[in-house]
Image: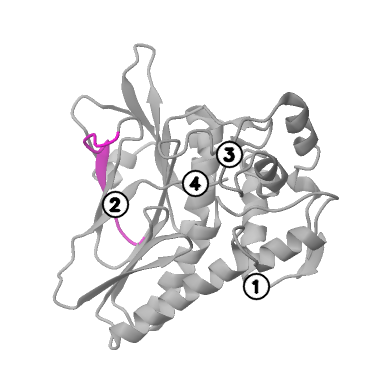
Amino acid sequence: MLAVVLALALPLGGADDVRREMRMVMGTAAALEVRGAPHPEAALDAAFAVLGRVDDALTQYRDSELVRLNAAGIAEVSTDLQVVLRAALDVATASQGAFDPSVEPLLRAAGYYAGAPRALGDSERRDAMNRVGFTRVRLEGRRVRLPEGGGLDFGGIAKGYAADEALRALRSAGARGASVDLGNSSIALFGPADLVGVRDPTQAGAEPLAHFRLENEALATSSQSEQPGHIVDPRNGRPAEAALGVTVVAARAMEADALSTAVFVLGAEAGLRLLRSRGAEGFVLERGPGGGLHLRATPGFAARHELRARPGLRVIE
């Protein structure tokens, strides 16, 4: 599962002590900003090194610790993989499988890792689904054991974890404020508030759906706009179609990342209930009976985050 985040962070703080840098990491343009660090260049280098470390462990697109685990079926794993898997299994349990890190056989069969995704036939889907199921993944200390023919995919959580870890590196370097934006895929920040604009996934180039303030929090948004069908419902192996877009705000980017995918699969009613149970917030973009768009949000989100929706876009809490 790949959670595509379509939000842009716009710093509101003063710029006199701000350093920004963008590099290609984790297959995306990673934009880091640091405020007030005594040695900003070293701080940024350390944060980018963290992003590289996480990518080396968790990518599916070249040799990595995760690829080797999937091939072997059992291995002693690093702290990075252990932490991400534990968090992924926790969200999988809470969402009753709407988010499931064991979806790798299904994505592989559908050609996602080869860069040529396609619709699966019924028999292919059934065969892949026989190897999917987070309850069959065993995490015992540092040892991970996968079911026969099974595999893990962290596309819906790895960037969130990387953003959290990079932000922690910037804090450790003495920054008074910082933000990590992984290709508009996961955003984590502390310090002065940022104004965030969420793009419309239904129409390229359209006015943003909404703007809201984000402070000392993390953000993730899932949608189908860039690659329709890429978010799969692990419970049935079919493309998720319960929502048009989902934005989640949580204390950590890793949590927001996984929850945004889960809510996209679940839809507004069950998804927003899941957010509240996890202490997170957010909103779901839906199409109403008449064809118009509206945002269905967790209670109080609009007031707490000063949400300003696009004219004509209704917000329901």
- Amino acid at dot 3: Pro
Quadrant that contains the C terminus: top left
Q: Considering the numbered disc 4 on the image, is that residue within a helix, a strand or a loop?
A: loop
Q: Give the main secondary structure, helix, strand or loop, of the magenta stretch.
A: loop
The residue at 35%/78% (across/down) is 44
Q: Which mark is residue 117?
A: 3
Q: Earlier in the sequence, mark 2 or mark 4?
A: 4
Q: Considering the numbered disc 1 on the image, is that residue within a helix, a strand or a loop?
A: helix
Q: Which mark is residue 3?
A: 4
Q: Earlier in the sequence, mark 1 or mark 4?
A: 4
- Label 3 and label 4: CA atoms lie apart by 16 Å
- Label 1 and label 4: CA atoms lie apart by 23 Å
Residue at mark 2: 8
Q: Earlier in the sequence, mark 1 or mark 2?
A: 2
3 and 1 marks in contact (CB < 8 Å): no
Q: Crowding near pointer 4: few (<14 within 10 Å), some, many (20+)?
A: many
Residue at mark 1: 79
- Label 2 and label 4: CA atoms lie apart by 15 Å
Q: Is residue 247 visible from the viewing direction of this image?
A: yes
Quadrant that contains the N terminus: top right
Q: Earlier in the sequence, mark 3 or mark 4?
A: 4
Q: Earlier in the sequence, mark 3 or mark 1?
A: 1
- Label 3 and label 1: CA atoms lie apart by 31 Å
